[in-house]
Amino acid sequence: MTGKAKPKKHTAKELAAKLDAATTNRGGGKAGLADRSGVEKGGHAKLECPHCKVTAPDLKSMQIHHDARHPKIPFEEAKLANLHATHVVETSKPRPGVRGSLKK
């Protein structure tokens, strides 16, 4: 006999959330390392902080990082390193992506 007001089965929403979490590439671990580092063009890390070498995907994110981590140094957009401009594109390699199902 089960307890009061306790569901015996999992809901469809809960099962779908578990399946999505298990099969979607979130960009972490070794699979997302190239994507986060910005080494290959097409990665989501476009800008690099000149002070601490942290990468960010866009200017607004880099400005938020700069205001939080380097508040005493004035923010200068010209000093940021554009990682997409410095690396050569290799068309033979697949471009990294964050959201994509591993289930075929």
Image: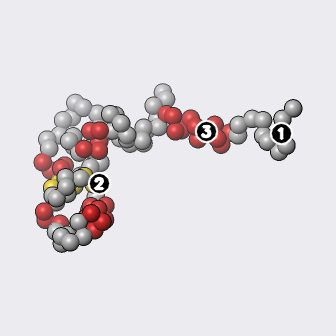
Q: Tell me if I can see residue 34 in this picture.
A: yes
> What residue is shown with label 2?
57
Residue closest to the eye, 61 or 84: 61
Q: How many marks?
A: 3
Please give left or right for residue 82 compared with residue 8 in the image.
left
**Residue 65 rendering spot, x and y as whole percentages:** 29, 62
Q: Does 104 appear above or below 36?
A: above
**CB atoms of marks 3 and 2 within 8 Å:** no
| Upstream in sequence: badge 3 or badge 1 | 1
| Upstream in sequence: badge 3 or badge 2 | 3
Q: CA distance from mark 1 to mark 2?
A: 50 Å
**Residue 40 rendering spot, x and y as whole percentages:** 21, 40
Q: Does 81 appear above or below 103?
A: below
Q: Residue at x 20, y 72 (%)?
A: 72
> Three-letter amino acid code at disc 1?
Gly
Name the image quarter holding residue 94.
top left
Q: Quadrant of the N terminus?
A: top right
Q: Residue at x 23, y 66 (%)?
A: 70
**CB atoms of marks 1 and 2 within 8 Å:** no
Q: Residue at x 42, y 38 (%)?
A: 25
Q: Secondary structure under badge 3?
A: helix
Name the image quarter holding residue 95.
top left
> What residue is shown with label 1?
3
Q: Nearer the viewer, mark 3 or mark 1?
A: 1
Q: Residue at x 37, y 41 (%)?
A: 27
> Three-letter amino acid code at disc 2?
Pro
Mark 2 Cα-neighbour bin, 10 Å: few <14, some 14–19, many ≥20: some
**Residue 64 rendering spot, x and y as whole percentages:** 31, 65
> What residue is shown with label 3?
16
Q: Check residue 12 in the rendering and tell me which mark sits there, or answer none.
A: none
> Three-letter amino acid code at disc 3?
Ala
Mark 1 Cα-neighbour bin, 10 Å: few <14, some 14–19, many ≥20: few
